[in-house]
Each structure stands twice: as C-alpha cells, then as structure tokens.
Image (tube, grey):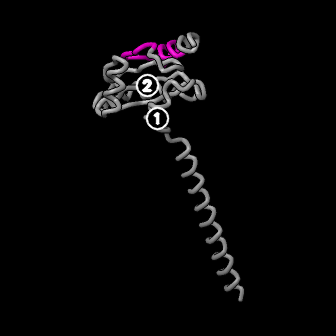
Amino acid sequence: MNQNVETVTKSSRARIFKWIAAVFFVLLAIVAVKNLPRGFSDDLSIIGKGKAAVVLIRDKNAVQTFDLLELMNGLRDQYAGEIEFLLTDSNTPQGKRFMKANEAPRVTLVLLDSDGKKVKVLFPPQTAESLQQEITALQVAQ
C-alpha cells in the first residue's frame, strides 16, 4: 500500500511538472511573438489623410533598403500616432506610380506632409539622428 501511495505521488508530481513546463513554454512563445518586429503597411491610400508620412521605396535586392528599414523600425514607436511609417516596393505597379508621382528613385525615404505633399526625399545612408531631425522639421512645418 505504501508503494501505491508513492507511485501515485510520483505520477501526480510528474503531471504537475508537465503542466508547469507547458504553461512556461506557452508564455515564452507569447513573449517571443510580441517582441517580433511588426510589419510595415503598404497601404499608400492613407497618405494625405491628416498625418505626415515617411515612405520607404524599397528594393529587396539592395542592402541599403534593410538599413533604412531598420532605422524606421527604431523610430516608429517614438512617433506613433503622429507619423505614418509606410513602405512600397519599387518593383510593383503601386511602387512605380508612387516613385513617378514623387520623383523619387528606389531605396529612398520620401517625407510627405499631412496633406500628402512631398516635403523631401532622403537618400541612404541615413542615421537615426538625421532621420529624427528630418521628421522634427516635417512636424514643425505642419
């Protein structure tokens, strides 16, 4: 009888340990997913609807695209609700139209005011500080 009690106790402990481990891994997965970088919208229809915008004209084959994308990702929380951070691909019809309308080449950042008018085109390389200065100037001009 004493052996049965020990077996049940070990079995209960093993089951509890499995549940704790499962909950731990689920929580770990949730934290990991929440910390993944968020994607950028490519919905250019929101340009000119009350918020200034920074649009990256990307080329997936250009290293500078990833540098500019990293800069935008580092700043977008700071300007949440004030500036729209968007991207468009230079190899899509939408991207080509945007490039033509704003006279901007691929792998550039286009700053637009709240009315959707081009304020400036920024070429790589850029730093977080230089982009912040340009965004601040954009906000002041509004």
- Which structural element holds mark 1? loop
The three-letter code of the residue at mark 1 reads Phe
Residue at the spot 71% in from the left edge and 85% down from the top edge: 2
- Where is residue 94 shown, x and y percent of the image? 35, 32
Percent position of residue 90, x then y: 31, 29
Q: Nearer the viewer, residue 22 or 55?
A: 55
Residue 71: % across, % down: 46, 24
Disc 1 marks which residue? 40
Q: Quadrant of the C terminus?
A: top right
Q: Is residue 121 left or right of residue 14?
A: left
- Residue at 36% across, 16% down: 123
Q: Name which residue type carries label 2.
A: Val
Judging depth in this view, the residue of 47 and 78 nearest the camera is 47
Task: Residue 60: give its label.
Answer: none
Q: Is residue 47 left or right of residue 65?
A: right
Check contact, mark 1 vs mark 2: CB within 8 A: no
Asked if the magenta segment contains residue 124, the reply would be: yes
Please name the residue shown 45% across and 35% down the image: 43
Q: Specify the segment rendered in magenta.
A: 119-135
Q: How many numbered discs sit on the rendered protein? A: 2
* Circle 2 residue: 55
Q: Quadrant of residue 63?
A: top left
21 vs 61: above or below: below
Q: Which is more N-terminal, label 2 or label 1?
A: 1
Q: Secondary structure at mark 2?
A: strand
Mark 1 is surrounded, within 10 Å at the Cα level, by few (under 14), some (14 to 19) or many (20 or more) other residues, namely: some
- Which picture quadrant has residue 82? top right
Residue 20 lies, in percent from the top left, at 63, 62
| Residue 67 vertical position relative to residue 41 in the rendered view, above or below | above
